[in-house]
Amino acid sequence: MRWVARSLAALSLALLPAGCGGYHALGDTPGRIRSIALPPFQNRTLYLDLEFQLQEALVKEVQAKSALAVVGEGQADAVLDGKVLDFSRVVIKQAPDGRDVEFQITVTAAFSLVERRTGKALSARDALSVSGTYLAGRGETESSARARALSDLAERIVSMILYAW
């Protein structure tokens, strides 16, 4: 009986690596893509600085989730270009006295990741939206909700460009 337990343990250890064959690390990229440029997106909204806040969030995401070096456009193997297409803030709840207390923020962007050497699009999306809510009376502000939404957008964009490979 003891040899059966040992045999099963040895067999399971031998088969363990085979079960991981489909694993895809988030930071995997083609060997030819080792660096990325993240210039500010074009801002098509009336809200100032969204493009710079998004750029900062994208840099943080790329550095946290990949082995790609963030460099200038002239040195990059790939360039992420994009546009902030829309930013909206909608009241979704009012207090009994008529005060606006809960809001939904939605940010929409388009992007394309292009291999600089060939001009080939590696990943693209015509419109990607993220939304978040905030409660005005509970210490949350539109600014903090906007930062969260832009961070979420950056996370989705980086995941999409890394998983595209």
Image (spheres, grey):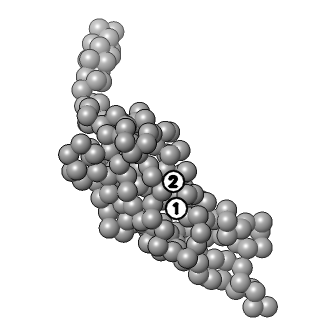
Tell me: 139 left or right of 34.
right
Calculate the distance from the C-alpha at mark 1 to the C-alpha at mark 2.
6 Å
Residue 67 image-quadrant placement = top left
Compare residues 49 and 22 and report the one nearer the observer: 49
Q: Is residue 159 visible?
A: no
* Residue pictured at 34% horizontal, 34% vertical: 34
Crowd band around label 1 with a 10 angstrom C-alpha radius: few (<14), some (14–19), many (20+): many
Query: What label sits on residue 55 in the rendered view?
Result: 2
The spot of residue 62 in percent (x, y) is 46, 43
The N terminus lies in quadrant: top left
Residue type, mark 2 in image = Gln
Answer above or below: position of 117 versus 133.
above
* Residue pictured at 28% horizontal, 45% vertical: 116
Number of numbered discs overlaid on the protein picture: 2
Dot 1 corresponds to which residue? 51
Q: Is residue 90 visible?
A: yes
Tell me: 155 left or right of 79.
right
